[in-house]
Each structure stands twice: as structure tokens, then as C-alpha cells.
Image (tube, rainbow, N blue to C red):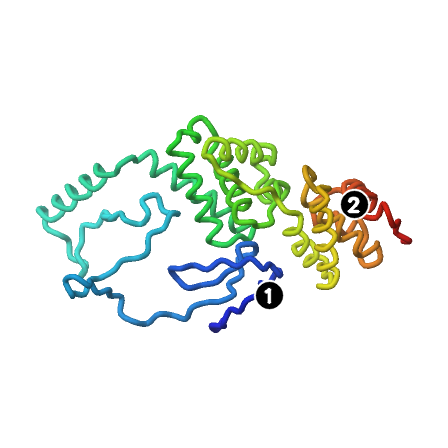
């Protein structure tokens, strides 16, 4: 994809999300909801050098640091090879020297247990990110939360899978990415959504994270895109939710169910049915029916709807 100019008001062409994240290291502008890269920087073919202003000398730079790697990418790996670049066997003295260096390198690891734990957590996190179609920014935020939890001892005695799932769900909440607990359980059934919710509450309380309440509006575009609804329908559903939010109707309600109910009221049962919305949103038809009745009663109490 070629490089394009990002203008104010641009949205993700894949899911319609208007919250885009810019990676300062690569210059990419991506959607944290579906992972679509809106602006992709071209390949940098310039020499991999930086210039020190004080000494005015060029220095070779390495790969960027990554929170996804147990040592942030700063380690050195010495392979078990006893031959040189030409394939000839190394002399005994060289092999013994490499063996001592490898043993010394292993001894300098700060905490081998932590390294193994982070490696396992990173593997599980990649599985979640791939199946939930999340962006790299969300994954890095989740790993940063997991590292904080590990340092505070929250992982000890608990399943790594559960803590990873809780960290990723927390990152989704912080970055306003529309993913609910049902999706977490559906893509990785070994961790139940009840467990993910418990870990989320533990992380928020222990790490002092102030996660905003989920806004039903962020789920409207996602549900509508699955059903192929028009942008006019989406805008009307968002208007209904904004009015309901101002009146305090959506407080304490399941945001996915409220979003599906707003779409159902907008469509008035003509474009889609409750069954269609239930499949697209993951909630039951009963939930949509109850939430839509509550919205109708609260919003149209003074002027009852003729439909």
C-alpha cells in the first residue's frame, strides 16, 4: 500500500473506527481495533547509521527495543557451533573460549525464571492478538501491563494464560478498542470469560489503572459492519446512544447489548432482525429485546413511537 496523507476526520476504511494510533518509531498510522494500516511508511533504504552530535562520529544502530521480548531485544545469543564461516572445524582453544563465553553470558541473565515466563506470556499473547485481530500497539500495551503484574507478584500462583488475557482486555479498555469478554472466551475457550473479568478487576485494583467505562458507541460500527448496514443507520444509532448517555440510561448496562438495541431501534426491524443482531454482536435475542424496550420507554416516553 502506498503512502497516503492522513487528514482530520479520517476513519479506518476497514471497520470505520475514527480512533487511529500513530507509531512514532515507524511512522505508521494503524487502527487499534482491526489492525488495518491506514498510512504505511515506505521502505527506508538509507544507511543504518546515526551521528553523535558531540563526537561527530557515525555509530551503527541496532534493532529497536521491543517490550514483547523478555530482555527488550538487548541480549546476545552464542550458538553451539564448532565450525567457522568456511565450514572448517575450530581448534580446541577456540571451542573452549566460546564455551566459556556462552556460560558467562548465561550467568549474566538477571532472572532466567522471568525470561521463561515472559517468553511463554508473549507466545500466548500473540495467539490472542492474532485471533482477535488486534494491532501491535494494543499488544505492546498488554505486555507492558503483564510485566508490571509480574514484578508485583500477581502472576505467582496464577495461570499465565489468565493473566495475559486479563492484561490484553485491560489494554483494550484503555485504548478504547471494541472487544468484549465473549470474544475472549470464543477465540481461546481454555480461559473462561469469568476468569478474564476477575483478572481485569485484580489488575485495575493492584496496578492503580483507571480504565474508562466502556462506551456502547464503539461497538456500533463493529456490529453494523458485520451486517452491512449503511452509514446513515450507524449515525442514527449513535445519536440514540448519545441521548441515552446524557440521560444516564446506559450506565451499568452491557455496552454490546445496548449498542445492538440502538441499531435495532434504528432499523425498526426492517433491515435486520433480532436474530441477525444477536449473531453479529454475540448477545442473546432476549437481551436485545429488553435493552431496546428500555431505550424506547426512556427516550420516547413523552412522544410514543408510532412504529
From the viewer's side, name the closer residue of 180 and 93: 180
- Label 2: few (<14), some (14–19) or many (≥20) C-alpha neighbours in 10 Å: many
Residue at 75% from the left image edge and 60% from the top image edge: 233
* Residue at the right extreme of this rendering: 306
Q: CA distance from mark 1 to mark 2?
A: 30 Å
* Disc with the residue nearer the chain's start (1 vs 2): 1
State the image coordinates of residue 241 (x, y, percent, origin top left).
71, 50
From the viewer's side, name the closer residue of 273 and 54: 54
- Label 1: few (<14), some (14–19) or many (≥20) C-alpha neighbours in 10 Å: few
Relative to residue 232, is residue 197 depicted above or below?
above
* Residue at the top extreme of this rendering: 157
Disc 2 marks which residue? 295
From the viewer's side, name the closer residue of 145 and 159: 145
Residue at 79% from the left image edge and 52% from the top image edge: 264
Q: Secondary structure at mark 1?
A: loop
Whether residue 271 sits left or right of residue 117 in the image: it is right
State the image coordinates of residue 263 (x, y, percent, origin top left).
75, 53
Q: Which of the two marks, 1 or 2, is nearer to us in this view?
A: 2
Whether residue 119 sits left or right of residue 209 in the image: it is left
State the image coordinates of residue 132 (x, y, percent, origin top left).
56, 49
Q: Secondary structure at mark 2?
A: helix
State the image coordinates of residue 37 (x, y, percent, origin top left).
51, 63
Disc 1 marks which residue? 13
Amino acid at each position: 500500500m502506498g503512502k497516503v496523507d492522513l487528514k482530520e476526520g479520517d476513519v479506518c476504511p476497514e471497520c470505520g473506527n475514527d480512533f487511529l494510533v500513530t507509531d512514532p518509531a515507524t511512522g505508521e498510522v494503524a487502527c487499534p481495533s482491526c489492525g488495518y494500516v491506514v498510512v504505511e511508511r515506505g521502505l527506508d533504504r538509507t544507511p543504518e547509521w546515526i551521528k553523535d552530535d558531540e563526537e561527530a562520529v557515525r555509530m551503527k544502530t541496532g534493532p529497536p527495543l521491543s517490550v514483547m521480548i523478555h530482555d527488550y531485544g538487548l541480549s546476545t545469543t552464542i550458538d553451539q557451533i564448532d565450525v567457522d564461516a568456511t565450514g572448517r572445524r575450530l581448534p580446541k582453544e577456540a571451542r573452549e573460549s566460546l564455551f566459556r563465553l556462552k556460560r558467562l553470558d548465561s550467568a549474566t541473565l538477571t532472572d532466567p525464571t522471568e525470561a521463561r515466563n515472559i517468553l511463554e506470556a508473549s507466545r500466548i499473547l500473540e495467539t490472542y492478538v492474532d485471533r482477535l485481530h488486534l494491532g501491535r500497539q494494543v499488544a505492546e500495551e498488554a505486555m507492558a501491563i503483564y510485566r508490571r503484574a509480574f514484578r508485583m507478584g500477581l502472576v505467582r500462583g496464577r495461570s499465565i494464560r489468565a493473566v495475559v488475557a486479563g492484561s490484553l482486555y485491560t489494554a483494550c479498555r484503555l485504548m478504547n478498542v471494541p472487544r468484549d469478554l465473549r470474544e475472549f472466551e470464543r477465540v481461546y475457550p481454555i480461559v473462561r470469560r469469568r476468569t478474564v473479568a476477575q483478572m481485569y478487576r485484580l489488575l485495575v485494583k493492584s496496578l492503580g489503572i483507571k480504565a474508562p467505562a466502556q462506551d456502547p458507541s464503539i461497538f456500533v460500527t463493529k456490529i453494523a459492519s458485520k451486517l452491512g448496514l449503511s452509514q446513515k443507520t450507524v449515525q442514527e444509532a449513535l445519536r440514540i446512544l448519545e441521548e441515552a448517555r446524557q440521560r444516564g440510561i446506559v450506565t451499568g448496562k452491557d455496552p454490546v447489548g445496548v449498542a445492538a438495541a440502538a441499531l435495532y431501534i434504528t432499523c425498526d426491524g426492517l433491515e435486520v432482525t433480532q436474530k441477525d443482531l444477536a449473531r453479529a454482536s454475540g448477545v442473546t435475542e432476549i437481551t436485545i429485546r429488553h435493552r431496546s424496550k428500555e431505550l424506547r420507554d426512556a427516550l420516547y416516553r413523552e412522544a410514543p413511537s408510532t412504529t
